[in-house]
Amino acid sequence: MNDSITTEQDVVVMECAETEVMTTSTACDDSLAVELPQDNAEYDEPVVDAAELERRQLASLAPRPGSLEATGLDQSFLSDLAAKHLFDGGILTLADIAERLALSGPIIRNLLEFMRAEARIEVRGVASDGSAANLRYALTDRGRAAALDAMSRSGYVGPAPVPLQDYIRVVNAQSVHERNVRSVDMDQAFENVVLRDEIRDQLGPALNSGRAIFVYGRAGTGKTFITQQLVKLFPDKTLLPYAIAIDETVVEVYDPILHRKADLDIASPNIMLGEGHDPRFVCCDRPRIVAGGELTADMLEVRYDAATRRYQAPLQLKANNGLFIIDDMGRQRVAPETVFNRWIVPLEEKIDYLTLGSGRHFSVPFNIILLFSTNLHPQDIADEAFLRRIGYKIEFPTLNAEEYGQIWSDFCRDADIVCEDNVLDYTLKALHAVHDVPLLPCHPRDLLSMAAERAVYKGNGRHINTEAIHVAWDNYFVLSTPDNFVRPSPSNDGGPTS
């Protein structure tokens, strides 16, 4: 059969096959059911593993829509989205379109029938296996014009979005504040981390409080590492939509760079079947979004790209049901007051108010654990009124000699480094004490790594002596001060002075 020419008789035959196969597809769940005898006392209760139980819970939270009405989206909206996919992909089968829109076969079939009735698509033959699910569809001239018109209004070409009200329901149902962290959880999460008990006992209640957390201390005290590890305390999975729909506007939420797709979703069931959760959602680990010195005020608002005509959700919305860490607070390209003031209302009301480029306002749950981390003193970057709104201010102190030695020993073991017996004592007394350098968690790793690199260069393997650690110290720290540093003379274009 010629791909570009399909006779009227061929279309009739294919439509009959389509009806028959899609009817079978619709009833596939019933055909898979196995009826057990009424008296089944001889059978053991089926064992459901944790992963299967979690899949069932997610399916209950966001069941697959079985009809167009259940998607919560308008037929004309979905037909425009399908037209954009056909414009992007050329000739697509029903199965291709179902996968692209993340909707079931019966919904796509009804949608394609609507588009054919409007003369926007045509059948271009059947794929090699001849099944109705593999009928090949393409846009007509009228359909291409409609697709271009749809693209001019919105550049989004992805899975069907989730209506705003459905998104709000799912976020509230999987709130990060529903889980209570216990001391035993903290001990397990930081089992191999040197962290004082008093800091663990501060972080645990802070996570349970629902309030923002302010972590501060000098650079190198482990604030960034510890705060990013806190997501381990929330091991359950969460559903994130690819995008949400606010009326006719689509705002993209899922970000493969920021979000980590869970194993449950990697082996998701066939899109044509009625199993599993709504595939418009992605099953992910709890979000952990980190923003540092690159943070700007516009990253906390809905952003519109005029070139692509697409909307992106702000960082805090992408962090919903998880952790949002603003690291290195006070070093951003925006004033600290601007960043702090952005959170006053969401922290008070647990609702974030956002605005689209059209001026349309909408609100979403503010369901995150918000952490600020800084090397500065809190009173240097925030006023007293805002600090009162943050329930927990946790200082990360420098180490004592015992803690420093524990980190030193752990890193030597993990990095397969052999130190002579006196190297640690030499580092503490002849280097840190003499130069009045406080003990920080980053020092053992950095100094030992540099010393091992020198030992390898000298042909000593990864065997470290006091000479190697002293050279590493000189390379690691800036020994000269601004007052005694010899700067190049302007007369020689910045070259070395004689």
Image (spheres, rainbow, N blue to C red):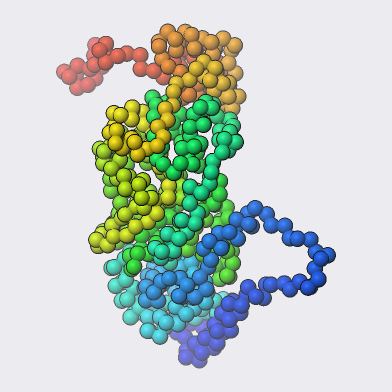
In percent of width and height, residue 428 lies at: 49, 12
Instruction: Judge whether residue 307 can be spotted in this image.
Output: no
Residue furthest toward the right? Answer: 42
Residues 452 and 196: in front is: 196
Quarter that holds the C terminus:
top left
Residues 381 and 25: in front is: 381
In percent of width and height, residue 392 lies at: 41, 34
Q: Is residue 281 above or below residue 141?
A: above
Please report the residue visible at 65 percent of the width from the left and 75 percent of the height from the top: 30
Residues 132 and 274: in front is: 274
Residues 173 and 54: in front is: 173
Quadrant of residue 341 in the image? top left
Quadrant of residue 335 in the image? top left
Q: Is residue 470 above or below residue 241?
A: above
In percent of width and height, residue 243 lies at: 41, 60
How many labels were placed on the picture?
0
Instruction: Report the side of 327 relative to 44 (left or right).
Output: left
Q: Is residue 156 above or below residue 213?
A: below
Q: Is residue 222 above or below residue 85?
A: above
Instruction: Judge whether residue 405 can be spotted in this image.
Output: yes
Please report the residue visible at 40 percent of the width from the left and 85 percent of the height from the top: 117
In percent of width and height, residue 249 lies at: 33, 65
Residue furthest toward the left? Answer: 491
Please report the residue visible at 54 percent of the width from the left and 23 percent of the height from the top: 407
Please report the residue visible at 59 percent of the width from the left and 76 percent of the height from the top: 25
